[in-house]
Amino acid sequence: MKRRGRGIACMWYPIGFTVAANPSAATVKVNEDGTATLLTGTVETGQGSLTVLGQIAAEALGIATEDVHVVSADTDTTPMDTGAIASRTTYVTGNAVRLAAENACAILFEVAAPMLGVRADQLEARDRKIQVKGFPQRHLPIGHVAHHAQVVKGQPPIGSASWNPPTVAMDPETGQGKPFNTYVYATQIAEVDVDDETGEVEVVRIAAAHDCGTAINPMLVEGQIQGGIAMGIGFALQEEILFDAAGRQLNPNLTNYIVPTSLDMPEIEVDIVENYDPTGPFGAKGVGEPTSVPTAAAIANAIYDAVGVRVTALPATAEKVLAAIKEKRARQQNKPQSLPL
């Protein structure tokens, strides 16, 4: 008989780290055609980081994302980046990109100010234009200003910057300190069906609410959450490395190391909780690794709600769940019956 259960799990997760230096650097060049080139050492592994970094540069320059050409991960030409680790790219590298773009924009303002008859601090960059704040009718195309800066003023609009979260060493005596500069939070609720005759678990639905600071690209955030949940389902129910008595791995390939497929995915409801962080680029923090943290715990709690057993060694395979159910039934059968009063 299939029994349905629901489980909830909450988590907090650090973004980047501060116990050691954790810098990123970026260079932004505004071209004479109004486009921009961004150089960053960060690595794109499918999470959409380069799209987000391009969006950050575009926002700071007042141009469209498609106007930004991103050059990444070439250590011969791009500035240093600590790495795509600790869910830090949007937060740390994004800050470096924002500062670099603002530095390039400051050169454009200095060049455009006499051309528009105002001070540099009276200008803003919007809609591919350098315009007077409060008087958008007075403007110049960014490409025109960049060309003037290059060939007339001799000030190519190139900005470089780095950003490092404040490094705070841990106290060697107490081990206390501030190892991370910011945190994200999440709650996931899992709904499962458990067959109490076979131990098979089917995840029916997961609702996930995640704080990521400002969601610079909500579609990518939702995709990250869905991908993290897929990994969490594998961790909870399927993925296990098996060894024989001699220590040889029995399942060294994807034929018998089982991972979730699209057919294993439940209905997923995503709620992005925006929580502006003043230390992040345009208020952003991150959403990478945290997305898979609460999934297994929520599923384990849902299994308990359905059949009343705790599986404490993942994955919660059908064999383990059924063994726990049988053990529970045996305990109930051997429990002394109370005498009637």
Image (spheres, helix red, strand yellow):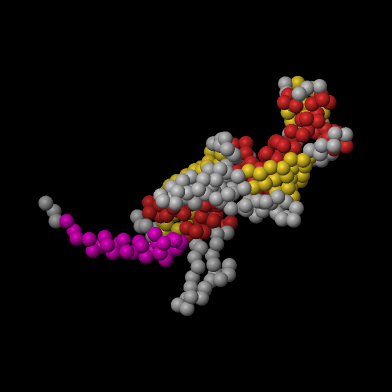
Magenta stretch, main secondary structure class? helix
- Which residue is at the far right? 151
The outermost residue toward the bottom is 246
**In front: 172, or 160?**
172
Quadrant of res 34: top right
Pick out the residue farthest to the front.
173
x, y percent for residue 4: 41, 52
**Magenta region, residue range:** 312-338
Name the residue at 59% across, 39% down.
280
Residue 71 counted in the magenta span:
no
Residue 84's spot in the image, x, y percent? 62, 52
Look at the image and tell me in which quarter the N terminus lies. bottom left
- Measuring from the top left, give residue 222's x and y in whole percent: 59, 45
Is 292 on the left or on the right of 108, as rendered?
A: left
Q: Please determine whether, in this image, residue 311 is positioned above or below residue 67.
A: below
* Residue 268 appears in the picture as rendered: no
Q: Residue at the spot x=73%, y=55% of the render?
A: 74
Question: Looking at this rendering, what residue extends furthest in the left direction?
Answer: 341
- Residue at figure coordinates x 74%, y 42% from the top left: 28
Q: Quadrant of residue 158?
A: top right
Residue 211 vs residue 332, the one in the foreground = 211
